[in-house]
Amino acid sequence: MEGFLEGLGVAALVLLAIIGALSGIIAGRIAGNRMGLYIVLGIVGAVALPFVLAALGVTALAAGGLLMLAVVALVGAVIVLAIGRAILK
């Protein structure tokens, strides 16, 4: 059972990184430059927000499964990308 949960955690982390990278690619294409920076910011936002919510005790994230995790990752990536765009502008 531990192996299954470990594999699920790795799959979730990969999913978060993919969502963040895709968000960064889209933001880089819209902005027209610094695509690498936007990809990194997207990945950081997508990976960080679920951990922050878990640290704050938001347990609905775990009950929602991978789909809820993907939605939260997308929101986190968008927030960090917007902050990064505002700072870099």
Image: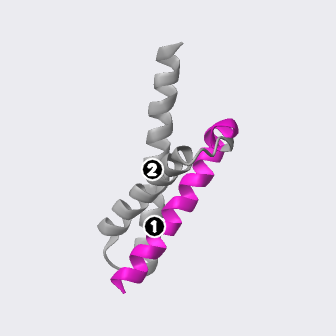
Describe the element under mark 1 as helix, strand or loop.
helix
- At label 1, the amino acid type is Val
Instruction: Find out whether residue 87 is within the magenta segment.
Output: yes
Nearest the viewer among 50 and 14 is 50
Quick one: which residue is furthest to the front in this view? 56
> Is residue 74 placed above or below 1 in the rendered structure?
below
Crowding at dot 2, Cα within 10 Å, few <14 / some 14-19 / many 20+, comes out as many
Magenta stretch?
A: 61-89
Residue 25: give its label: none
Residue at 44%, 32% in the rendered image: 10
Q: Quadrant of the N terminus?
A: top right
Residue at 56%, 49% in the rendered image: 56
Residue under label 1? 80
Nearest the viewer among 40 and 56 is 56
> Is residue 1 placed above or below 65 in the rendered structure?
above
Q: What percent of the width, then of the height, locates residue 79?
A: 51, 68
Q: What percent of the width, then of the height, locates residue 17?
A: 43, 48
Residue at 45%, 70% in the rendered image: 81
Residue at 46%, 78% in the rendered image: 30
The CA distance from mark 1 to mark 2 is: 11 Å
- At label 2, the amino acid type is Val
Q: Quadrant of the C terminus?
A: bottom left
Residue under label 2? 47
Describe the element under mark 2 as helix, strand or loop.
helix
